[in-house]
Image (cartoon, rainbow, N blue to C red):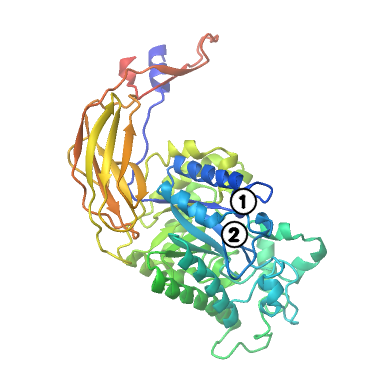
Amino acid sequence: MNLRTMLAMMILLAGSLRAGNNEFRAVWVITWEHINSGLTAEQNKANIREILDNVKTANMNAVLWQVRQGGTAYYNSSYEPWGRYAGYSDPGYDPLAYAIEEAHKRGLELHAWFNTFQVSDTSPGTIAAEHPEWICTNIDGQAMPAYRAASPGMQAVRDYTVKVAMEIVRNYDIDGFHLDYVRWNEYDEDDMVNVAGISLEEQLNKMDGELSEERVQRLAKSAGTKRYIYDTEHPYSATPPEGYDTWDNWRRAGVTKFVKQLHDSIQAVKPWVRLSPAALGKYNWSGWNGYEVVFQDAALWYNEGYIDQLMLMSYHWTTGNGFKGMLQDDCPNCWKDYTAAGRAAGRMFTPGPGSYVLDENNVWNNHPDIVYKSRQVDFVDGFQFFSYGSWEGHDYWETAGTSFFANRKKVKPLTYMNSDQPGAPVIQLSKTGDLSYKIDVSVPANEAARYAIYRSEDDVADTDSDKILDIVYADQDFSYTDQLSGLQDYNGQYHYFVTTLSRYWIESAVSNTETSDSVLSLPPTVIATSPADSGEISIGTGLRFDFSKTMSGQSL
């Protein structure tokens, strides 16, 4: 191979996959990642802004923001005390209100992430302190001494939890409500042997990862004996509660009743707020699964319309083929076999890679393959990653935003919820520099909405394929500046247009189209070499040149 051919093969070529303009992209943000009682209110606010800036840099469009943990609150609650990471006191600002405001400024959705039946904290004012009779019990009627969970089988627990949740829905401008630990607990007496040595911090910080096969088998064998899967109203008995043929069906029914009750309550107040569960990655097959081990029937909720988006905690798998398998290729051990009705109705389905699991297994670089392989499954509507801290540890935001998330995306239109099309905006374009254009957007006279700003290389507006420059949340006229770098290959005219997006992501007709002058495209420069400039190279060693823009090997 001669030097010319070698250089041509080693040139860094630009490009990315495109699969339409709809894809949900989110990350879970844990309490301790967004608030610290040792910091001032302004420092915590700055941290929130940095988190959301990073999320937008990655071209994500949503955050799952933890607001309830262990039976404590990270917002202004009438029912529960402030949480441990807020210092059990008012932090001097409303973390949820501020996060929503800043997320919307960046065009991001914010889903309130709510730990449902996990209520470990025993501080004054918590469920565990005020209602110990609501805590799950074992066969002997003894309540959980650690990792406490409220019983989904008790109507009082369900009613109270719906009341706490609905205060958030009513008082905050959230886009979604996300239920974590919406299931029975996975603990038995053997987990409590050294209960004195289990700190509250350990209980709150425990990751919701995969259980070992040994642990799952232990839980299965201890059903009805050592597990904490009863309550004070439903103590152990040889016969299940009235109306049920098995205890397991009664347990599943209790969780399902709660989910439906909350969904009905949300729909009556703010029907655009999407309800989603953090569902175990396996539905009902092999080992650690939701249906059999913790009595979580997520497929039923999805198919019956008790939820609007099925979000998986897909922590069992660390490869692209593994994800594609559990989605559709390894049936019957796959989600495709159990979700036909929900998919046909148009509800959202999004797998959730465990980024911390990829990190622990030294396969962090599998993220792109997981995304690309999952996109081959036609019912996958996007992704959510656990968690922000793992991505921050790898400073992965820009890498993702320039590779597998290279372009901004909208969320799938939820036509089954509401199909009303919003009014279209009107735009004006002005040139503000050789490489910059300002778009003035006049919005329809209605409530706040998101606006998608598009740029096309032809004069046919296509909202499915034209580049989305940004998504802006606004309730009044606004301006957006497209600052070009000159590094783009294109040097013709750009065509700009804008659309309105409703709370259901229904898109308006396009605005008028405005056209730029022919844009300036600067000549390429070498931005890096390997070996570095002035370095020595042996005969037969390859050279790498990185250019400031796409190059053709034929030009060398």
Are the residues flagged by discs 2 and 1 in contact, CB closer than 8 Å?
Answer: yes
Secondary structure at numbered mark 2: loop
Look at the picture and state if 285 lies above or below 142. above
Between residues 24 and 543, which one lies in front from this camera angle?
24
**Residue 6 placed where, x, y %?**
42, 17
Q: Name the residue rendered at 48%, 42% in the picture.
A: 53
Query: Please, what secondary structure does the residue beneath circle 1 have?
Result: loop
Q: Is residue 318 above or below residue 541?
A: below
Q: Give the label on residue 35, or none.
A: 1
- Quadrant where the C terminus sits is top left
Percent from the top left, x then y, of residue 209? 62, 57
Circle nearer the N terminus (2, 1): 1
Foreground of the two, 236 or 434: 434
Identified at 42% across, 47% down, the residue is: 105
Percent position of residue 269, x then y: 40, 71
Q: Is residue 158 above or below residue 450?
A: below
Q: Residues within 10 Å of mark 2 (few under 14, many from 20)?
A: many
Vertical position of residue 207 compared to residue 534: above or below: below
Which of 61 and 542 lies nearest the eye of the viewer?
61
- In the picture, measured across the screen, residue 183 lies left or right of residue 551, that is right
Q: Answer few, some or many: residues within 10 Å of disc 1's Cα (few below 14, many 20 plus, some between 14 and 19).
A: many
Q: Is residue 281 visible?
A: no
- Which amino acid, by three-letter code, is at mark 2? Tyr
As measured in the structure, the alpha-carbon distance from the residue carrying label 2 to the one carrying label 1 is 9 Å
Dot label at residue 74 = 2
Q: Position of residue 420 (x, y in %)?
A: 25, 63
Quarter of the picture containing the N terminus is top left
Q: Which residue is found at the position 57% from the left and 41% from the top?
A: 392
Residue type at the position of mark 1: Ile
Q: At 63% from the left edge and 51% from the top edge, which residue is drawn?
A: 32
